[in-house]
Image (cartoon, rainbow, N blue to C red):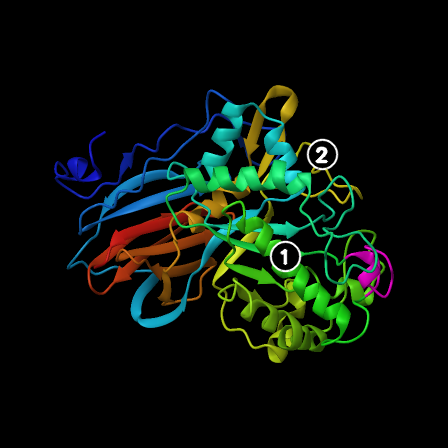
């Protein structure tokens, strides 16, 4: 197919022109407020590889509640023209956090749903998430053993009193489901993939509750034998996945650590206070990682509800959000499987009876970040000249491309301009209930 530049060479003036966007969405409605895109073994909507226009032009991708899904257009950047009204000023002098990326979780449930499809549909689903023709997730979260989105409760060592973990072993959920899918996702991705793992619970014999579910913590105190054994459990997990050529970028010390402290949750959990988790990392998990083959693995704290962030951050200090990891990448029509019927939503819903899956609107919303804000991008200034209902954020990518994402929650269209002092004005129009990505060559 001709490059984007081919089309631009024949533009006599500035109108926005549509660009081919791969295969279009095969849209259908289930009676909700928007549409889903249907995929199967023989058809799935795709995107062309991102090709930036030459300087003086910009590329626009737009998704709307009304039904557009990453529709793309090219327009001219205006110069020497005074613009009136709402203006967002792109300012690279203001530099903030560097982005790690975006992704989702490959749980037992996600793996079960993906594997319930034919080989062709499986490939289209994984390519939709991880390939250049898809939305290019670069982060995968992996539960360590079972969670509520499993069909049974298990740990990697259910032999009571086995502090040396002589009976530690992965399960079929790992070796026959999650690991093959992660390997397939890596195979279709052009971007480096970062994996991180999270435990839901220690084996029950390590816990004060002697149960995988409900209120309970590790026995003893940080630095004690149960904490040492639990730290070794992390290392064994990393060792076993490494045998399958899967290495991890990071770990979280515990999924939702407050649930095991405050409530009798009906599914797998384990409690930590901020101070307990800090001391576990300091005395047990940190030293265990440092003395292992995995000393470069990063550790993340909290992994819990957002309302807890200020207090936990004050105990292990964090600055700025550098990415986002969604939950299950695929669930069934019921929102599972989930052994406690704690059903949820997902960007992709699988209908195994019809060998079909549906990409929901949130899939495309995520795409405006995962696709256009790759790892290494840096958030920069984007300053409005007036109060506005638009939400916006700007980035400078490692390839020198500028990105501005604009979200319009309101029920009305909003006109505005983006001003880049180095290159000029983009005359923009944000439809009601839409998200847009504007991209142009900055360097």
Whole-number angstrom distance, CA of label 1 to CA of label 2: 34 Å
Rendered residue at 18%/51% (across/down):
56
The quarter holding residue 421 reads bottom left
Relative to 126, say whether 213 is above or below.
below
Q: Is residue 432 visible?
A: no
Name the quadrant of the N terminus. Answer: top left
Which residue occupies the foreground of this view, 380 or 382?
380
Q: Position of residue 382 (x, y in %)?
A: 36, 65
Secondary structure state at the residue bearing disc 1: helix
Q: Position of residue 160 (x, y in %)?
A: 84, 56
Relative to 268, say whether 68 is above or below.
above
Which residue occupies the foreground of this view, 180 or 356?
180
User: Disc 1, disc 2: CB below 8 Å?
Assistant: no
The quarter holding residue 288 reads bottom right
Q: Is residue 152 visible?
A: yes
Residue under label 1, please give it.
Answer: 236
Residue under label 2, please give it.
Answer: 334
Residue 93, which numbered label? none
Q: Residues within 10 Å of mark 2 (few under 14, many from 20)?
A: some
């Amino acid at each position: 197919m001709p490059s984007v530049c081919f089309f631009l060479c024949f533009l006599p003036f500035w109108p926005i022109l549509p660009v081919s966007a791969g295969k279009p969405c095969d849209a259908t409605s289930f009676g909700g407020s928007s549409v889903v895109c249907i995929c199967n073994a023989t058809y799935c909507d795709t995107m062309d590889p991102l090709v930036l226009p030459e300087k003086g032009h910009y590329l626009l991708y737009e998704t709307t509640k009304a039904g557009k899904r990453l529709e793309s257009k090219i327009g001219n950047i205006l110069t020497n023209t005074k613009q009136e009204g709402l203006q967002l000023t792109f300012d690279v002098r203001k530099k903030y956090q560097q982005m790690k990326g975006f992704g989702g979780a490959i749980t037992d449930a996600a793996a079960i749903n993906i594997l319930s499809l034919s080989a062709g549909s499986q490939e289209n689903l994984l390519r939709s998430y991880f390939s250049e023709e898809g939305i290019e997730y670069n982060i995968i979260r992996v539960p360590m053993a079972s969670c509520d989105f499993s069909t049974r409760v298990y740990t990697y060592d259910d032999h009571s009193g086995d502090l040396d973990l002589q009976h530690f072993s992965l399960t079929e959920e790992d070796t026959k489901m999650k690991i093959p899918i992660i390997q397939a996702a890596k195979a279709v991705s052009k971007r480096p993939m970062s994996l991180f793992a999270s435990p839901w619970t220690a084996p029950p014999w390590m816990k004060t509750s002697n149960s995988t579910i409900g209120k309970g913590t590790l026995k003893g105190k940080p630095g004690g034998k149960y904490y040492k054994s639990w730290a070794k459990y992390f290392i064994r997990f990393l060792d076993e996945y490494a045998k399958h050529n899967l290495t991890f970028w990071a770990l979280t010390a515990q999924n939702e650590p407050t649930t095991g402290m405050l409530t009798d949750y009906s599914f797998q959990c384990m409690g930590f206070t901020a101070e307990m988790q800090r001391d576990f990392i300091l005395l047990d998990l940190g030293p265990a990682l440092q003395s292992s083959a995995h000393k470069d693995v990063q550790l993340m704290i909290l992994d819990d509800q957002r309302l807890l962030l200020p207090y936990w951050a004050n105990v292990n200090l964090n600055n700025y959000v550098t990415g986002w990891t969604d939950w299950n990448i695929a669930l069934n029509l019921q929102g599972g499987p989930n052994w406690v019927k704690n059903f949820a939503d997902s960007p992709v819903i699988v209908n195994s009876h019809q060998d079909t899956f549906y990409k929901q609107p949130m899939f495309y919303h995520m795409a405006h970040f995962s696709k256009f804000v790759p790892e290494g991008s840096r958030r920069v200034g984007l300053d409005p000249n007036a109060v506005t209902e638009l939400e916006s954020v700007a980035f400078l990518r490692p390839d020198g491309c500028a990105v501005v994402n604009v979200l319009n929650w309101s029920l009305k269209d909003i006109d505005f301009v983006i001003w880049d002092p180095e290159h000029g004005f983009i005359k923009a129009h944000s439809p009601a209930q839409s998200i847009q990505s504007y991209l142009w060559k900055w360097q």
